[in-house]
Amino acid sequence: MTINTPSNTAALMSMAVTDIILLLIMFVGLLRLRRHGGGTFGLARLLWKQVRWLFSLIVVTLVYGISSFRE
């Protein structure tokens, strides 16, 4: 597999710019959360809201995988 770096430059740059923008948005949101008195528990609640659907999906997938593996 050959990686053609010059032809991927535009895609890599756009990915880097997008990542930086998303990181800045995240930091602004965290600073706003802290300013409004969310504190540590507010941040934990926010993170739980963000990942609970993913956590539920992983648990269901593992339970289904284990139960189908036994059969």
Image (cartoon, helix red, strand yellow):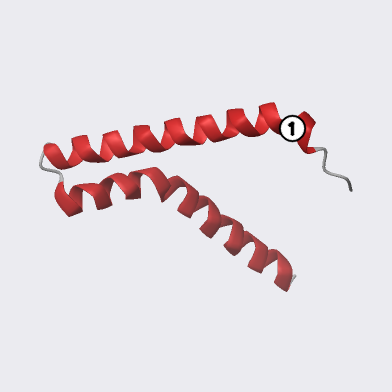
Whether residue 3 sits left or right of residue 35 in the image: it is right
Please name whichever residue, 21 or 43, is drawn nearer the observer in this view of the structure. Answer: 21
Measuring from the top left, give residue 41's x and y in whole percent.
18, 53
Residue at horizontal 33 percent and vertical 48 percent from the top:
47
Q: Amino acid at mark 1?
A: Asn
Q: Quadrant of the C terminus?
A: bottom right
Residue at horizontal 15 percent and vertical 49 percent from the top:
39
Whether residue 36 sits left or right of residue 17 in the image: it is left
Taking the view exactly as shown, the residue that stands out farthest to the right is 1
Residue at horizontal 46 percent and vertical 35 percent from the top:
20
Residue at horizontal 28 percent and vertical 34 percent from the top:
28
Measuring from the top left, give residue 51's x and y in whole percent.
42, 48
Query: Which residue, given by chain and number where applicable, does mark 1 sit on?
Result: 8
Please name whichever residue, 49 or 62, is drawn nearer the observer in this view of the structure. Answer: 49
Whether residue 45 sits left or right of residue 26 in the image: it is left
Determine whether 58 is above or below 17 in the image: below
